[in-house]
Amino acid sequence: MWLAVGILARRCNDFTQSVHPFATRLAVAQNSPMAKPAGKIAAQPAPGIAHYEQPLSERMRTFLRLEFLYHPMLRNSERDEDWATRTTVSTLMEILAILSRGDVRSEVLNELDHQISALERFHSHTGVDGGRLDNLMHNLSASREEISTIGTGFLQPLKDSDFLNAIKHRSAIPGGTCEFDLPEYSHWLRQPIDRRQQDLAEWIQSVRPLCLGVCEVLWLIRESAQPNEEQAVNGMYQHSMQKDGHCRLLRVSLAEQSPLFPEISGSQHRFTVRFLEWSTVDSRAVQTSQDVPFQLSIC
């Protein structure tokens, strides 16, 4: 959290008012990827660096899966190809399946409350850009208000759609959404892009507030930790967390062209990182015997 607030005190001249087509909140430079048109969302890590993440709680697993699905769904919804539209609908079905399990809405609200409360404590700290901090808190509060307003039945319009239910049921069958199985779906896919986007925007609107809140929370969690230089001796690194620590996410960073990749396992108390050598898909990866320098963020 110190890092996130520290960032608020820097780069104070690059504030922008760009607005996401599905959002109207103030834009903060650091989370501008959430405020740009979907086609410009920077979902990939910085050039030259590959980030590997490991959630340490069920809440974080759910959030990361939603983020993983949400950005590609937005990008594909803007493309004219019928296969991009198919992918958009298929991804929406996956998001709906995740949101239908457990009370994800309450989880997001609780996380937003936690982040807002944590940021409020920095108003009295010196060296913090108060205006940028206020903008960030405004965004989080706007997300919280919007998610609270949609109520517990926000998924009902999607669940009540006969059109989407037919696609959902046939999707369980390999190739089940082809033309002879779902002629109405195939006919809809042939409609002009403006007509398809109108329907897609209505469906996406049902899940947008929750997914956008998840993306903002994950950005804050990632920015809350300063990456540290570490070294895995003989390809292995082990770490025990402090008892009073509140770790939810691990981030391991390597050079993008590295022949190694990390295998992370553990819990909120301790974890292990093994670096494996990869050659081809026909050969099983094995742990390297070399010492491996890497960056570690405990968020």
Image (cartoon, rainbow, N blue to C red):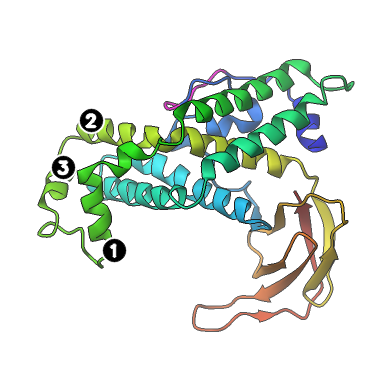
Is 5 situated left or right of 60 in this image? right
Which residue is label 1 attached to?
Answer: 172
Q: Secondary structure at mark 3?
A: helix
As shown in the figure, which amino acid type bears the numbered disc 2?
A: Asp
Q: Secondary structure at mark 2?
A: helix
As shown in the figure, which amino acid type bears the numbered disc 3?
A: Trp
Location of the N terminus by quadrant is top right
Magenta stretch: give its range. Answer: 17-22
**Label 1 crowd (10 A; few <14 / some 14-19 / many >=20):** few
Q: Separation of disc 1 and disc 2 at Cα? A: 28 Å
At a point 61% along the width and 80% down the height, the residue shown is 285
Q: Secondary structure at mark 1?
A: loop
Q: Separation of disc 2 and disc 3 at Cα? A: 12 Å
Instruction: Look at the numbered discs 1 and 2 and tell me whether their residues touch, using CB distance below 8 Å.
Output: no
Which residue is label 3 attached to?
Answer: 188
Q: Earlier in the sequence, mark 2 or mark 3?
A: 3
Mark identifier at residue 194: 2
At a point 36% along the width and 46% down the height, the residue shown is 92
